[in-house]
Image (tube, rainbow, N blue to C red):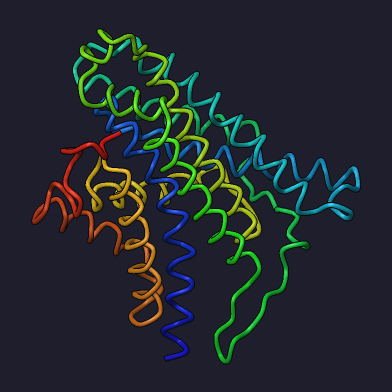
Amino acid sequence: MEFFIQQFINGLTLGGVYALIALGYTMVYGIIQLINFAHGEFFAAGGYMGVIILSFMASMGYMETHPWLCLMGSMALTMGYCAMLAMAVEKVAYKPLRFASRLSVLLSALGMSIFLQNGLMLTQGVYDKPYPTSFTDGGFSIGMVTMSYMQVMILVMTVLLLIGLNILVFRTKIGTAMRATAQDKVMSALVGINSNRIISTTFALGAGLAAAAGIMVGLYYGSVRYDMGFVPGIKAFAAAVLGGIGNITGAMIGGLIIGMVEIMAAGYLSSEYKDVWAFVILIGVLYFMPTGIMGENVDDTRV
């Protein structure tokens, strides 16, 4: 039983990260019906920007005196950087193709993913870049179950970010504008909503959440790598499809399920095939339930 609880906690931690990334996929799809395959690179860019900022603060000695304040500051700066990067990508790669075929936009997304990944490789190198993780070491045990401080931080930050996103989408004017644009761009424009600005905002929000996930993954595993966005990005896409792409509640549920299945399969079956299960779920959902658990953006939860 202790082993199951331990795996459950690990699954929640990983699922929370996938949920944060999956929200970017589902929000962009809800607005412009685009599978943004470059989204995983925002996750990687967030991981790199986080280690650059934290390493700079460590060299200045701030990490020794105010480590958690430095972490919160670096997370805010990183989310802002990735939000601006996503807005620039949207302006360059997607906006000119707003009325082009879906295939053209899809190819543009794939090209932008390759461009960003190679940009990271050329600027940051091909080797792993270590995170300053001394302040996140340690944890506590309850019986045979162990939980690290980093896992606690990931779970708390994930819950706070998901609550914040829900408040933004369902309790604010900008969230109302996002949902209106997702449902009917022409009608929303007639009532004075600037759809271009809303689309850019959606890209920025999704990339900001992915950047936060990138920092937390870097701290959890101790390093980042230029191609770290590919596999988690595909798994997060599978989570978005599982939950019902275009539905933000579905993306959260799908992320938690994918993370839980991966960890349970690694613990009870084989860790060598842990990356396979997300793709098995993706194939199964597309075959048996193509609209996902929550259905594909059919109600007011579409964003």
Can you name the residue that lies furthest to the left here? Answer: 288
Q: Nearer the viewer, residue 259 or 253?
A: 253
Quarter the C terminus occupies: top left
Q: Nearer the viewer, residue 225 or 181?
A: 181
- Residue drawn at point x = 35 percent, y = 38 percent: 25
Quarter the N terminus occupies: bottom left
In this rendering, position of residue 95 left or right of residue 162: left
- Residue drawn at point x = 42 percent, y = 75 percent: 8
Classify 81 as above or below 267. above
Q: Residue 21, image x and y in percent? A: 43, 45
Q: Residue 301, image x and y in percent? A: 26, 40
In this rendering, position of residue 21 left or right of residue 59: left
Classify 13 as above or below 31. below
In this rendering, position of residue 161 left or right of residue 129: left
Q: Residue 184, image x and y in percent? A: 20, 20
Q: Residue 131, image x and y in percent? A: 71, 53
Classify 302 as above or below 256. above
- Residue drawn at point x = 39 percent, y = 17 percent: 93
All told, the count of numbered labels is 0
Q: Nearer the viewer, residue 121 or 45?
A: 45
- Residue drawn at point x = 38 percent, y = 30 percent: 175
Using the rendered view, name the quadrant where residue 114 is placed: top left
